Amino acid sequence: MTTRGYALRIALIAAMLLILCPLPAWGAKGGAEAPSKRERKEAFVSNNDGTTFTEVSAIVLIVPLGAAARRALDAVRGIRMNAKGETVNVASGKVVSASTGVVADFILIVVPAIAAMMSPEVGMPAVAGILSLILHVGLRASTKRDDWSFPDGVASPFGDESAPHAKRPYLGAYRAAMTLTTAVAILAIDFHAFPRRLGKTQTFGVGLMDVGTGSFVLANALVSREARGVPPTRECHFGVEPYCLGYNAVVVLHNVLPLLVCGIVRAVAVYAFDYQQPVSEYGVYWNFFFTLAAVCSIGQLVTIPPRYSALAGAVVLAAHQYALTHEGIGELIRADWDQGKRGDTWVMLNKEGVFSLPGYYAIYLIGVGVGNLLEKSTLALHNARKATGGVKKHGNTGDKWAWQWVMRLCVLACWFWGGALVCHHYVEPVSRQSANAAYVLWMAAFNFQTLAAFVLGALIFPSAFARTAKLLDVCNGNLLVMFLVANVTTGIVNVTTDTMGASDQVAYWAVFNHMVATCAAAFFADSLFKTLKGKAKVE
């Protein structure tokens, strides 16, 4: 049986458990009894008014800054990738072990992210200063060398620029970094050491953890088949051939099945372990995985040409915002009802998750449109360089086309920032809960500026340990495994530990070990999958 077959069986078993469980009792209050541990934790992470756009951006930009510092460290040590794809020490000519780079990746990328989130007033300036010093030293070291040119398609952050649908390392680094920061935040929020203002906002406001769902939706859109111009698959799925009626629906089910399984398992686990889940986030039974699955399903079932996708996203967003402000949908979402007042209908029980879907779908459409534009721009980058005889060489203007590419991305991010600020101040403040216009435009601006930061770091230090840091490369290839392990370890810590009463030192140590386990799981999965693929080829 295939992996998808096993996943389908697990989904059916989990669904049966979900149906058989006495779900109406889930989330019910205890009357005059003392608040339970779950209720105290829900109150602990609720009623947050948020922080500022600047603080959220500054904290997250620590990650691409760390990735650039990782490249700078290679420059200082004289380590580069040669034309064969091997990582070598320029001075000795010896091949460098990949394990050495992994430790440096964790220290310069993950540890600064933990420090910036857990202590933004002290940790963030400290790590930013240290990383900036490494960048300065690395830049001075690299400018003294004359051997930092790199072959096409090896160290370029754009991957193989001449090949359509090729893997784009800058997108991989961005997706991995987003997942790593999310993994840090989902456990850190449960400790007092994590500033409350960085958690998810209740109704309106800007919080660090508000960027999670929107960023995942946008990331999925940027690498989707529609964005990259990949023809639709014509393979047989679940025994249904391409010429059969309903084949497209089966393909969609095949693609979103892992998300559905994760969503069902999480829903059952939350009930079974009496785990905290404020219903104001998604509703009673809804969760993050169901939002991703629903958006991906709609995006694949409703066919829109990529060149018109961003325009369609703008139309959907305008209609969604009109419904929020003029049709009473916004007030319905924000109504602070407990389970007893929501009624018995499935839609009302999950009103936050259901009625925010148009906003997340708009993010997806915008992501597909911009992703398609970035793919075409990358191919145009190669053609322009080839037509003018430009070479990719560090420290001169030979790669001016790549710099123009990233500057266009920065301009695009600025446009979205302008739209987000206008909507935030003059239409309706940012609301993750309803995924309104200000939130959608903020997600686009925030993620595109992060993408630009990764590309900038790669252009400044092109001859690095690899096209992307080894840790980011492995995590990008095993995002689902890493995210699931992060959720499991977060649940274990919360069930076995009184996180609200833990000291700051315990919080730091718990989050650090949590990230070590998460990254280790990604490497184990990567090694396992490569072994299985090797055996399959032999057979």
Image (cartoon, rainbow, N blue to C red):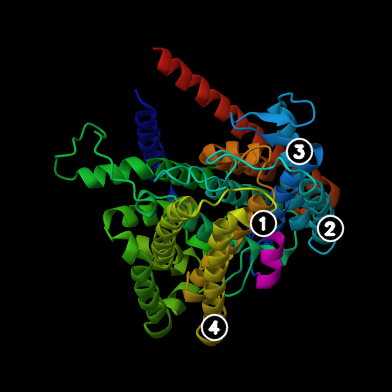
Number of other residues with Cα within 10 Å of mark 3, as a class: few under 14, some 14 to 19, many 20 or more: some
Look at the image and say whether residue 58 sits in the magenta stretch: yes
Question: Which one is in front in this view, the residue at disc 4 or the one at disc 3?
Answer: 3
Q: Earlier in the sequence, mark 3 or mark 1?
A: 1
User: In this view of the protein, which residue sits in the foreground, 4 or 221?
Assistant: 221
Q: Earlier in the sequence, mark 1 or mark 2?
A: 1
Q: Would you say the residues marked 2 and 4 are in contact, meaning their CB atoms lie under 8 Å apart?
A: no
Q: Earlier in the sequence, mark 1 or mark 4?
A: 1
- The numbered disc on residue 323 is none
Quickly name the residue at label 3: 104
Secondary structure category for the residue under label 4:
helix
- The numbered disc on residue 422 is 4
Instruction: Name the side, left or right, on which 340 lies relative to 275.
Output: left
Residue 358 position (above or below residue 519): below
Q: Quadrant of the N terminus?
A: top left
Q: Quadrant of the C terminus?
A: top left
Question: Which one is in front in this view, the residue at disc 1 or the one at disc 4?
Answer: 4
Give percent across and percent down for residue 439: 52, 71
Q: Amino acid at mark 3?
A: Ala
Quickly name the residue at label 1: 41
